[in-house]
Image: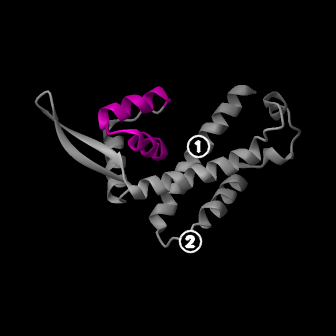
Amino acid sequence: MRLHVLHHGAEREVTGAWMAAELAEHGYRISPGTLYPLLHDLEDAELLTSQERVDDGHAVRCYTTTEQGLATLADARRAIRELATELLPADEPEDSQRHRTPGARGDRPTSLLVAEIDKLISRDRSDDCRRRDLQREAVTEVLSGLRSLLAEGQ
């Protein structure tokens, strides 16, 4: 979800209510008690910034992705792209990926995939552990979505 929030905050200003509706469209049913702390955590990590606006006489907080958030998003996209390239080779038809034999290159256990992601993210020489943790969370969420998609296709 964090990566999704950063993605939309990079495109335009978003409100918590809009973000909740957007996440719901992707299967994330979260309460305001979960969403707003997530938004505040991203803001505390300086990945999002917010401003209060008045809309129809009501105060509304609008969030946008910061430069640091854009860098984190770019890093996560690179890690996801590298992982997807390895797991889903372009020269192999999609249907044949579903029929791999056990032990084939793309059928590694999730723990090994997470270890690979950790290696990719650890290439970031930044001393910002929180940033790397957020990257790991974002990629782990994407992996979860990929696992769901692959399970649906079998």
| Residue displayed at 37% across by 33% down | 20
Task: Look at the image and say whether residue 34 sits in the magenta stretch.
Answer: no
Left/right of residue 103 with respect to residue 147 in the rendered view: right
What is the quadrant of residue 23 in the picture?
A: top left
Q: Which residue occupies the foreground of this view, 36 or 125?
A: 125
- The three-letter amino acid code for the residue at tag 1 is Val
Residue 137 x %, y %:
52, 52
Q: Distance between the residues labelled 1 and 2?
A: 23 Å
Residue 10 x %, y %:
41, 44
Left/right of residue 47 with respect to residue 129 in the rendered view: left
Callout 2: helix, strand or loop? loop
For the view shown, which residue lies furthest in the right direction?
Answer: 101
Q: Which residue occupies the foreground of this view, 42 or 103?
A: 42
Residue 34 x %, y %:
36, 42
Task: Look at the image and say whether residue 3 sits in the magenta stretch.
Answer: yes
Q: Is residue 71 above or below residue 84?
A: below
| Residue displayed at 30% across by 32% down | 17
- Could you say which disc has been placed on residue 142 in the image? 1
Q: In this view, does 13 lie above or below 42?
A: above
Q: Do the residues labelled 1 and 2 touch (CB within 8 Å)?
A: no
For the C terminus, the quadrant is: top right
- The three-letter amino acid code for the residue at tag 2 is Arg
Determine crowd level at label 2: few under 14, some 14-19, many 20+ residues with C-alpha closer than 10 A. Answer: few
First in sequence: mark 1 vs mark 2: 2
Determine crowd level at label 1: few under 14, some 14-19, many 20+ residues with C-alpha closer than 10 A. Answer: some
Residue indicated by mark 2: 125
| Residue displayed at 73% across by 46% down | 85
Residues shaded magenta: 1-27
Left/right of residue 152 with respect to residue 44 in the rendered view: right
Query: What main secondary structure does the magenta stretch of the protein show?
Result: helix
